[in-house]
Image (cartoon, helix red, strand yellow):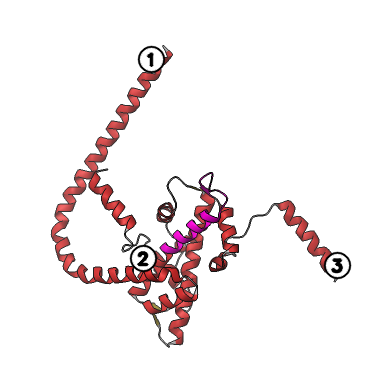
């Protein structure tokens, strides 16, 4: 890759002016919401940009609060933890459930049954 | 309307790149984590859309506008995004204005860029050649060691 090409890429990555996610795809997702009829161009651009900021914010917060700092890794459990602990990410708890062992799940199921029995 | 459920996913390559840019160099992101972030992003779009739509409905408008999206960000407690979003929108609007003037210029440039692309593909071919040559050398070295 030539130097000029490289510079262009770096510039694109660092400038906050451009967007890298495809606007058409974001519009498709927005339109899949049943109440939405029309979206103006600026609103579409802003949502796309906001989604990029959100991805960065989510990744960085998960990494900072995560357990993988020493090993330089970001794992699923870091994301699930941050979704549970951070208020602004609470809306993600449904799609980012914490993983538990089957053994623990069966145990909690057993306990729930017992409680039901007691009632 | 989306035909398939995959149509509501954002492209993985782009999401991966955005994650890489956000994290310090050399951080490994597990496949599961990447997929989860991508899904989270789709849910974020839906959540933001529904919030913004509420503001539009309150104002009895049918079209979502920039103000609705900004209000939605505040409601979702992503105030930290407001400032960068404002800046990005301003730059975008400027770009849109300049686009009309630029599009004619582009048409003129098109012929030029076509020849540029031809150059590029030739470069890539050369790169491949180099790789092959290097592989050949390495094999040679291994043989030497064995002997």
Q: Main secondary structure of the magenta part?
A: helix
Q: Residues within 10 Å of mark 1 (few under 14, many from 20)?
A: few
Q: Which chain does the numbered disc 1 sit on?
A: B
Q: Which residue is mark 2?
A: A23
| Percent position of residue B112, x then y | 14, 53
User: Residue at left 77%, top 56%?
Assistant: A107
Magenta stretch: includes residue A71: yes
Disc marking residue B144: 1
User: Residue at left 51%, top 54%?
Assistant: A63
Q: Which chain does the numbered disc 3 sit on?
A: A
The secondary structure type at the circle numbered 3 is helix
Q: Earlier in the sequence, mark 2 or mark 3?
A: 2
Residue A117 shown left or right of residue A20 in the figure? right
Same chain shared by disc 1 and disc 3: no
| Percent position of residue B9, x then y | 46, 61
Mark whose residue sits in front, 2 or 1:
1
User: What stretch of residues is rendered in magenta?
Assistant: A52-74
| Percent position of residue B54, x then y | 48, 81
Disc 1 from disc 3: Cα separation: 77 Å
User: Residue at left 57%, top 60%?
Assistant: A82
Magenta stretch: includes residue A80: no
Q: Which residue is mark 3?
A: A117
Same chain shared by disc 2 and disc 3: yes
Quadrant including the N terminus of chain B: bottom left
Q: Quadrant of residue A37?
A: bottom left
Q: Which chain does the numbered disc 2 sit on?
A: A
The secondary structure type at the circle numbered 2 is helix
């Amino acid at each position: 890759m030539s130097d000029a090409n490289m510079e262009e890429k770096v510039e694109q990555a660092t400038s906050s002016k451009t967007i890298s996610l495809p606007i058409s795809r974001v519009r498709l997702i927005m339109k899949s919401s049943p109440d939405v009829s029309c979206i103006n161009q600026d609103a579409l651009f802003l949502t796309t940009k906001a989604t990029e900021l959100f991805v960065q914010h989510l990744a960085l917060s998960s990494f900072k609060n995560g357990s993988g700092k020493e090993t330089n890794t970001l794992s699923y459990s870091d994301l699930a933890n941050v979704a549970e602990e951070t208020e602004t990410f609470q809306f993600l708890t449904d799609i980012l459930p914490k993983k538990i062992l089957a053994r623990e799940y069966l145990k909690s199921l057993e306990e729930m049954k017992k409680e039901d029995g007691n009632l | 309307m989306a035909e398939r459920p995959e149509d509501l996913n954002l492209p993985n390559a782009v999401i991966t790149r955005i994650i890489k840019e956000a994290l310090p160099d050399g951080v490994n992101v597990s496949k599961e984590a990447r997929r989860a972030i991508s899904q989270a992003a789709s849910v974020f779009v839906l959540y933001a859309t529904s919030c913004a739509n509420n503001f539009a409905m309150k104002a009895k408008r049918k079209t979502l506008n920039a103000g609705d999206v900004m209000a939605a960000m505040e409601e979702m407690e992503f105030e930290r995004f407001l400032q960068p979003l404002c800046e990005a929108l301003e730059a975008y609007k400027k770009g849109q204005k300049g686009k009309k003037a630029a599009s004619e210029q582009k048409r003129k440039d098109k012929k030029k860029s076509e020849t540029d692309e031809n150059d590029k593909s030739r470069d890539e071919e050369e790169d491949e050649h180099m790789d092959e040559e290097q592989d050949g050398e390495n094999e040679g070295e291994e043989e030497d060691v064995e002997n």
